[in-house]
Amino acid sequence: MLVSVNAYRYPTAILCGRVIVDDDVYVVPYAVMRADEMGENGADSDRYAF
């Protein structure tokens, strides 16, 4: 997880995986962000959320 010093993330927001939050981004309360890497056959919509 990389959060810019120029971004604001509420303490109740959950960031999981390789989430990158750039400058001037506001992550709202209770937001959930996931950043997963899909494998070669990553088209299985039952296992991945975008």
Image (cartoon, grey):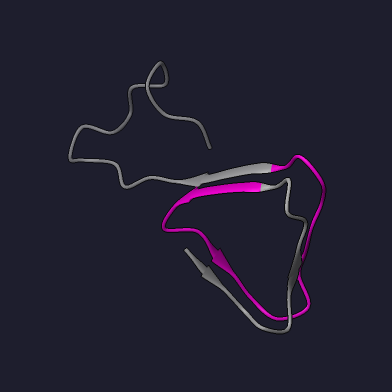
> Which residue is pictured at 62% across the width and 79% down the height?
4
> Which residue is pictured at 73% across the width and 75% down the height?
7
Q: How many marks?
A: 0
x and y percent of residue 41 in the render? 20, 32
Q: Does the magenta segment cover residue 46? A: no
Q: Nearer the viewer, residue 30 or 23?
A: 30
From what the image shows, is residue 7 above or below residue 43? below
Name the residue furthest left: 40
x and y percent of residue 9 in the render? 73, 62
From what the image shows, is residue 22 above or below residue 13? below
In the image, taking residue 49 as reference, residue 13 lies left or right, namely right
> Which residue is pictured at 42% across the width and 21% down the height?
45
x and y percent of residue 44 in the render? 33, 22
Quadrant in which residue 43 is drawn: top left
> Which residue is pictured at 41% across the width and 58% down the height?
18
Quadrant in which residue 11 is drawn: bottom right
Q: Does the magenta segment cover residue 20? A: yes
From what the image shows, is residue 38 above or below residue 21? above
In the image, taking residue 49 as reference, residue 18 lies left or right, namely left
From what the image shows, is residue 29 above or below residue 45? below
Name the residue furthest front: 11
Q: Nearer the viewer, residue 15 or 40?
A: 15
Task: Report the magenta residues as a range.
Answer: 14-31
In the image, taking residue 46 as reference, residue 42 lies left or right, namely left
